[in-house]
Image (cartoon, rainbow, N blue to C red):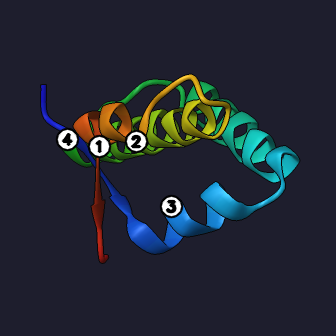
Amino acid sequence: MARISFPINSFNHFKNCLPDILEEEISRTNIRLKLSNGSQTNEERQLYQEELDRLSALKYISQLRKGKLTKEEFNQKVELAAL
């Protein structure tokens, strides 16, 4: 399974922000995915997958913050990139 690429500056923001801010972002991203109404074109499918990857990365950050994932487990799932 390929690791999810996630910007390191976004990781630092969500790792250190108030827990409510992270949970609100997870909720907003989840709603955007549900409202996307399916993907038709290749571009729409790619954008959907990118948003899905972002949601997964945010959930992994939440689990890391709560102690449900170790840093090593997080690094197996997410690759921090300078985007």
Numbered label attached to residue 58:
none
User: Can you tell which of label 4 and label 1 is closer to the viewer?
Assistant: 1
Which residue type does callout 3 highlight?
Phe
Q: Indicate left or right for 15 with 1 as reference.
A: right
Residue carrying label 1: 75
Q: Is residue 40 above or below residue 44?
A: above
What is the spatial separation of the Cα atoms under label 3 and label 1, in whole angstroms? Answer: 12 Å
Which residue type does callout 4 highlight?
Asn
Whether tag 3 and tag 1 are in contact, CB under 8 A, the answer is no
Residue carrying label 2: 71
What is the spatial separation of the Cα atoms under label 3 and label 4, in whole angstroms? Answer: 28 Å
Residue carrying label 4: 42
What is the spatial separation of the Cα atoms under label 4 and label 1, in whole angstroms? Answer: 29 Å
> What crowding class fits label 2: few (fewer than 14 Cα within 10 Å), some (14-19), or many (20 or more)?
few
Q: Which sits earlier in the primary sequence, circle 3 or circle 1?
A: 3
> What crowding class fits label 4: few (fewer than 14 Cα within 10 Å), some (14-19), or many (20 or more)?
few
**Dot 4: element:** helix
Q: Nearer the viewer, residue 42 or 9?
A: 9
Residue carrying label 3: 11
What is the spatial separation of the Cα atoms under label 2 and label 4, in whole angstroms? Answer: 34 Å
Q: Residue 68, position in %: x, y?
A: 56, 22
What is the spatial separation of the Cα atoms under label 2 and label 1, in whole angstroms? Answer: 6 Å
Q: Is residue 77 above or below residue 18?
A: above
* Quadrant (top left, top right, bottom left, bottom right) of the N terminus: top left
Q: Residue at x 29, y 43 (%)?
A: 75
User: Can you tell which of label 2 and label 1 is closer to the viewer?
Assistant: 2
Q: Nearer the viewer, residue 70 or 4?
A: 70
